[in-house]
Amino acid sequence: MEAVSSILGLIAIGAGISMLGAVAAGIGQGYAVGKAAEATARQPEASKDIRMTMMIGMGIAETTIIFPMLISIILIFAYAPQFVDILKALVAK
């Protein structure tokens, strides 16, 4: 049963590490919004162009958040039950 706990722990650690990518992208998005607010404050007449560019960049940055989250979900919900079943079968032999 130690092997089952070890595998599940490693899966949880891998899911947590993959979410670091989402955290980094969130920090980057916050920085981008701050810079867009600064640019709008400096040139209010260009706010439409600044907003459009920011939204395109935010959409691209959002994809970097979705991928690590998808990897974490797959690790937790798809692989964990399979490893538990395999290891239980090995322990039972």
Image (cartoon, rainbow, N blue to C red):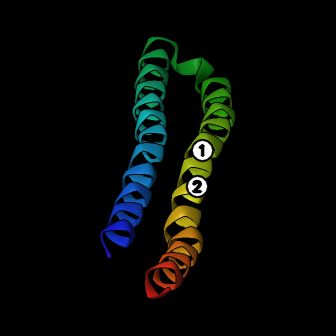
Q: Residue furthest bottom?
A: 92
User: Image point 48% across, 38% down: which residue?
Assistant: 21
Q: Amino acid at mark 1?
A: Glu
Please state if 83 lies on the left or on the right of 46 as rendered. left
- Quarter of the image for residue 26 reads top left
- Quarter of the image for residue 53 reads top right
User: Image point 62% across, 49% down: which residue?
Assistant: 67
21 or 44: which is nearer to us? 21
Please state if 41 lies on the left or on the right of 74 as rendered. left
User: Image point 50% across, 72% down: which residue?
Assistant: 80
User: Image point 43% across, 81% down: which residue?
Assistant: 91
- Quarter of the image for residue 52 reads top right
Helix, strand or loop at mark 1: helix
1 or 20: which is nearer to us? 1
Q: Relative to 16, is 34 above or below?
A: above
Helix, strand or loop at mark 2: helix
1 or 2: tag closer to the N-terminus: 1
Residue 49, image x, y percentages: 68, 25
Residue 54, image x, y percentages: 60, 30
Q: Residue furthest front?
A: 93
Residue 93, image x, y percentages: 50, 86
Residue 27, image x, y percentages: 39, 32
Q: Amino acid at mark 2?
A: Ile
Question: Badge 2 local density, few (<14 within 10 Å), some, or many (20+)?
Answer: some
Q: Relative to 24, is 66 above or below?
A: below
Q: Residue under circle 2?
A: 71
User: Which label was assigned to residue 62?
Assistant: 1
